[in-house]
Amino acid sequence: MKNKIVSIVFLLVLIFTLWSCHTDPLLQPMPKNTDISFVQPANWPSPHYNFQNNTLTSDGFALGRRLFYDARLSIDNSISCASCHEQTTAFAQIDHAFSHGVRNQLGTRNSPALFNLAWHTSFFWDGGVNHIENQPIAPILNPVEMDETIPNVIAKLNADPSYRLQFKNTFGSEEINTQRIQKAIVQFMAAIVSNQSKYDQVKNGKASFTADEQAGYILFHQKCNTCHAEPLFTDFSFRNNGLPFSLDSGRAHITGLASDRFKFKVPSLRNLNFTKPYMHNGSIASLGAVLDHYTSGLVPSPTLDPLLQNPITLSATDKSKLIAFLNTLNDYEFVKDLRFKQP
Amino acid sequence: MKSNLILLSILCVSLFSCVKKDDPIDANASSNAKVTFSNFVGSQPLTLQTKWYNNANGDSFKVNVYKYYITNVKLVKSDASVYAENESYHLINEADVNSHSFVMANVPEGSYTSISFLIGVDSARNTSGAQTGALDPINGMFWTWNSGYIMAKFEGVSPQSTSMDKSVVYHLGGFSGPNNVLRTVTLTFPTTMIVKKGTTPNVHIDGDVAEWFSFPNVIDFAQKPLLMTPGKDLVNIAENYKDMFKVNHID
């Protein structure tokens, strides 16, 4: 009799255990690689965007990442954000001066790398977008990029029950609207932090520069640091760095000021190994050629930056040392971070 | 005796009805107030797509799209106290009759003598990231290439236009510095508006499209058929249209 009771209890426990294992596959917890948090690197300034009114959660991050990689955001379902922003190349597009939009159209500026965006105060080469949450809709609507409409995107996402569930998990209800799309994509974009380069290891006392790298670092401080300020390696300002004349008026397109003509946002020098070609128009193919531009290729014009009125002086050895230092800014960890990969 | 009774009855009835009529305003209670916008060109009601009008320069035109933001609405009482609507963002779209009016809730009971509002979206909301409702970019009133709202939008055609397809397009945007097209409008009511429980007074405001192009800056459709980037030309139109509204009546 006692054995019988034990058997029944055991059976009940077994049934209960098996039953509780059965859950809706859609309701299973997200894969581990969405465990996300925003940790401000030591000795960095406070981020400009701190997820206020858009609390970073694993659900929101996973939704944003899915949207980032989803070609349904384009009119013919062919182009996603990731088409021109590939993780393996620091979310830039290597070897493309201009990226391709829908219907084989070419863009007009070099696809910028995406990392440490939470520190940026404006977006695009001309700084036309004043808030990170307003950035994602611009390429969606741009006729030479994704050329889609917001109502179409919402309809496509609504047609997919798994998206409705993700919006519910993130925002509390299934409603899909522009604001939620913007905020979700930003949960992904703003969480991409690149701070694991050799330079960062050195700063944290976990590695040391070689003699050439150290010499390059000193040269960097003498010649480059004003615009490409540490630790983000940009001061986020707009400057004319003396490229040959082009029709793209840059910052002036936004401000309407003649004094802003041909000025573009100073790019970060992190991850240069992944992001060639360089400059807003992708016109310079190698780091060596970039340095040659600053020593002997500057084109004078009324808005040429005051710091570049005279060419930068660098010997051939200086250049190789400077490049040795710049190569310590490549972050080989974040380009393969599983959390940022296509889901 | 009989007549006394009659008189007494009349007195009672009068007193009773007097009490009803003068139901005292409860300063701690609140009710609703409505605002309705009607758009005109001069004295003629605005009709999209089909009707022809003339501007001050003598150019003729039709209107295809006409939208503007009314935001930060405030009602001012006779004692100068102010009611400011919460989340006060309204997009008036001529093509959508439902958008022509809105009801403001939780307006304290009392006598109101004027209304004020902003034509356009305050600079704070132009720089605060993703918005929703009337401010959702889906409404076609947001510049994605140069962050900021189109405060007011006029699109039409004119034989005098020098654009390729004879269109005339004015997108009023710009929220900072010399390019700021935001304008505050204050309108005094012709009669006091009483807000009290059980009623929803309706402020009828007329807007005149012709004002965009007339005073002080006459707009010549041949010279400036397309204005869609922040700058002095758009500020000139804002200076014109800041006087386009008047209160017709309150009922």
Image: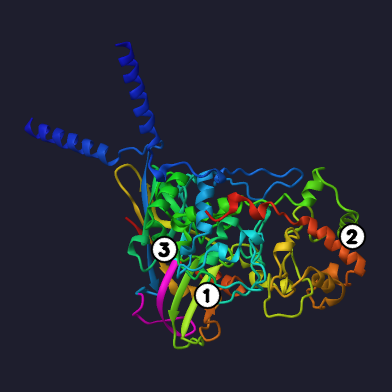
Q: Position of residue A94 (x, y in %)?
A: 66, 67
Asked where in the image residue A145 lies, by quadrant, the reply is: bottom right
Point out the stretch of residues depicted in magenta.
Answer: B48-67
Disc 3 secondary structure class: helix
Magenta span contains residue B62: yes
Which class describes the residues within 10 Å of circle 2: few (<14), some (14-19), or many (20+)? some
Residue at 57%, 62% in the rendered image: A82
On residue A151, which mark appears?
3
**Picture residue at 80% right of the left edge, 60% below the top:** A326
Q: Which mark is residue A219?
A: 2
Residue type of the residue flagged with mark 3: Pro
Relative height, residue A42 to residue B219 (above, below): above
Closest to the observer: A52 or A76? A76
Q: Is residue A232 left or right of residue B27?
A: right
- Badge 3: chain ID: A
Element type where label 1 sits in the image: loop
Chain letter behind tag 2: A
- Image depth: mark 1 or mark 2 in front: 2
Is circle 1 on the same chain as circle 3? no
Q: x, y percentage for residue A168? A: 42, 46
Whole-angstrom CA distance, mark 1 to mark 2, is 60 Å
Report the mark closest to the observer, 2 or 3: 2
Towards the viewer: B165 or B119 = B165
Give the chain letter at badge 1: B
Q: Looking at the image, do the residues carrying marks 1 and 3 touch, with CB atoms under 8 Å apart?
A: no
For disc 3, the neighbor class at 10 Å (few under 14, some 14 to 19, many from 20) is: few
Q: Disc 1 designates what residue? A: B215
| Circle 2: residue type | Leu
| Amino acid type indicated by mark 1 | Phe
